[in-house]
Image: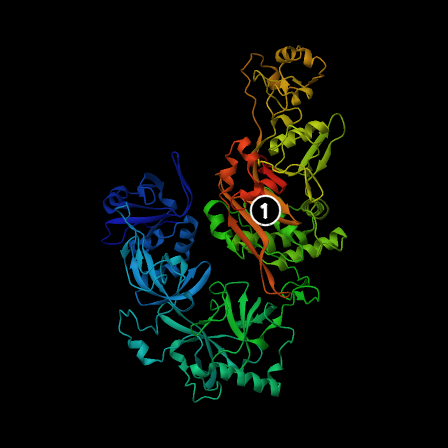
Amino acid sequence: MTMSLLPSVGDGNCYYILTEDCAYGSKYFQAGNMCFCTERSYLRNFADVPPARFLRVIMLDDSSTVTINVGILQPVREEMAAFLLSISSHNERLNCFLERMSLEAAVQAVPGQRVMVEVDRQHFPGVIRYVGSIQKSTLTALSPFFFGVELQGEGENRGHSDGSYLGTEYFKCKPNCGIFLPFSRIQFIPTLDNDHGKQKPKVDAEEVVPVKVGDAVSFYVDNVRRKGIAMAVYREGTQWFVKVCPEEEGTTDIFREIPMDAVVKEDLHSQSLFPPFESDMGVEHSKQIKQQIGESGDECEGVNPSLEVNSMVQITLDKGNQVSGIIRWLGYLPHTKHKMAGVELDEDKGVTAGEWLGKYYFHCAPKRGIFVKLQSCQPDVRFQCSRNRDLNLVDYREQEDVPHAPLSFPPLRNEEAVHILRGRMKGIQGHCNSCYMDAALFSLFSCTSVLDSMLFTPFPLCDRNVQNILRDEIVNPLRKNGFVMARSVMHLREQLTEKGQCSSFTNAEKDPEEFLNLIMHQVLGIEPLLRLQSGAQKEQDCYCYQIFMDKQEDLVVPDVQQLVEHSFLSSDLKLVEIPSCFIIQMPRFGKEYKMFSKIIPSLELDITDLLLDSPRECCVCSDVATWECSNCFKDKMFSPTGLKQFCSTCSKQVHSHYRRKTHKPTRLRVPEEFRSRSSRGSQQVPREKMELFAVLCIETSHYVSFVKYGPENEHWMFFDSMADRHGGENGFNIPTVTLCPEVAKYLDLPLAMLALQQPRDMDGVAKRLFCDAYMYMYQSKKMALYK
């Protein structure tokens, strides 16, 4: 596919965005990075026929000059480039460029225009007061453009300024009512009926009555006049449309999309469809309607009496499309005589963020909210109410399997992980003692792909239904949206109850290893993660390794490396092969008693000396080892970590000491390619190391997890599936993911200082990582490519 990189006429610079990752020398640029070249440079490069395949550009982020293949460059208009630069996340920036709708709305936005803005993951109304640069950029080419918005209504006092930024005033408003933000956090409301900031005369607008969401309207179908409510107002190209919910459609909200010039706004006081309404009579009006309905009983027709706030429902929309969601609000809206339900949908098929005629009745993401007649809601057929469970977390009825190609969403890393996973109502929603499963699933799949074979590989004993639930209802939503509803985990728990022949999996507290062994071994039938051998005995397979050891007086504050080595030595164990995933349970006696008050996470686990028949290094001279001595392991003369093995010469010297004459070293098998090299120091023994990617912790029978989402020591996030709760018995848990960079502070402390740290004095949630560790998870990215 050919692509024109020709700049816009008159541009001094040509701007581009990278559509793929790109390496240049020692530098690495993610897709979404932006760059530019001068028009003169462009013309010089492409004067030849055929044009050059590479273009020399300047990166806008760091001003470095690089040469990039034109195949991964997409031209960007200068005015759009300025708005895109305000987005710090490269991935989000590229998505906004590709989707275009919000970006084009940002370019056309003007001061005075009403918008909805995202503040602390909630959406509030506001008015644009400023559009432009707010940073004294060192880049002379282009400065990022931000929106200065005055928050109004429920958004008041949720801002950060009075219209000033870094000492410069850009507009005036009340303190804490102003905010500066990129266009990606703004929902642009159509400006058809805005009186502010008009740049063009409203010739067309004067020919028809402007319509906004919530207005009563009439329209004609086959020369018959129909009435309804405007549910959305939007533009496609130059044409405006109104999405109308007709009154006469009965119990289903069949939306009709009608051109604006075919819709007439009704006079509320002259029509019979909607009773008269005045703003100061709204509350009394609702009471009267409720009283009339209560007396007549007409409203009860077609309404399922079990439906209430937090009920899961299904709704039939336009063209028979069916959507599902959760009722977040029930009541009577202005201009409506029916009891209405405010529903948060599972998909972006709504028309609002919970707002009706400028007032918020509930809050949800944009395009996830919808208001419909309560009688249009039917209980979600996939769920059946149970007396012992929350109304929004109920029994699952199996659906028909619809054949489709499995989707795959990659694990989240670095900035993308923070952007998608951090916040309230993020992670996996807990319910009914599910924390052991929530924490395990979040740890295994949020930021790593080491066990993604569980999602796709057709193992011999694999239960495809469970595999589909795990992939499509849990892992993919977690990686795509950063949130998994409790009903998805309940669906999995019910399937595990059936397969594991254990009736308590849906409601009882379990241990993570019990869940992992069941799903990996009995249900999916994946190959064992570990192959172990003890002495000359037969190989044994397992999925999780439990550390067993006697109380060691010299191990006051051990790290994971020391614990694994002591455990392997005491049981005379070796790894038959390098595992792709190494799940290690800490030494405990029940949930209450911990053998060690603190355990230091080893960010890397060196398994070189734990491998069977693998080349080893002499701990004295670094030559290839031929003897191993378990007795020397505890000798305080040697280092506190690492199994002790020696070359022949060093072994004789070490064991000539009178204290070690009783030791009984064992001969090691040396691979042929290493045995042929005899000159000391010439054999470089490769080290096999695994990296820590997650830690499960337990405190008072509740499991939480720490996940490492990036390469730095401070790149940790903390997940709790039941961090908070909304409502009483019929409420729901609020899962939360927070960043915990304070962990790095303690990882860098000397061992002696860490041992003296009082848990109650440790910052943030660090205490839980060091004091409550239950299960460590390590991965070998090299082996994950093959297993």
User: Which x, y percent locates residue 160?
Assistant: 37, 58
Give the percent coordinates (x, y) of residue 643: 63, 24
In screen coordinates, is 169 left or right of 339? left
Binning the other alpha carbons within 10 Å of mark 1 as few (below 14), some (14 to 19) or many (20 upward) gives: many
The amino acid at mark 1 is: Ser
- The residue shown at (44%, 81%) is 216
Left or right placement of residue 127 versus residue 643 in this view? left
The structure residue drawn at horizontal position 39% and vertical position 34%, both measured from the top left corner, is 26
Residue 700 on image: x %, y %: 65, 49
Element type where label 1 sits in the image:
strand
Q: Nearer the viewer, residue 396 or 223?
A: 396
Q: From the viewer's perspective, is residue 267 above or below residue 358? A: below
Residue ID for mark 1: 705
* Location of residue 322 with respect to 336 vertically, above or below: above
Q: Quadrant of the C terminus?
A: top right
Q: Is residue 322 left or right of residue 655?
A: left
* Residue at left offset 28%, top offset 47%: 137
Tell me residue 561's x, y (percent).
61, 31
Is 437 displayed left or right of 289 in the figure? right
Residue 575 in view: no
Residue 601, quarter of picture: top right
Residue 573 versus residue 46 in the image, above or below: above
Which quadrant of the view contains residue 756? top right
Q: Nearer the viewer, residue 176 or 623?
A: 176
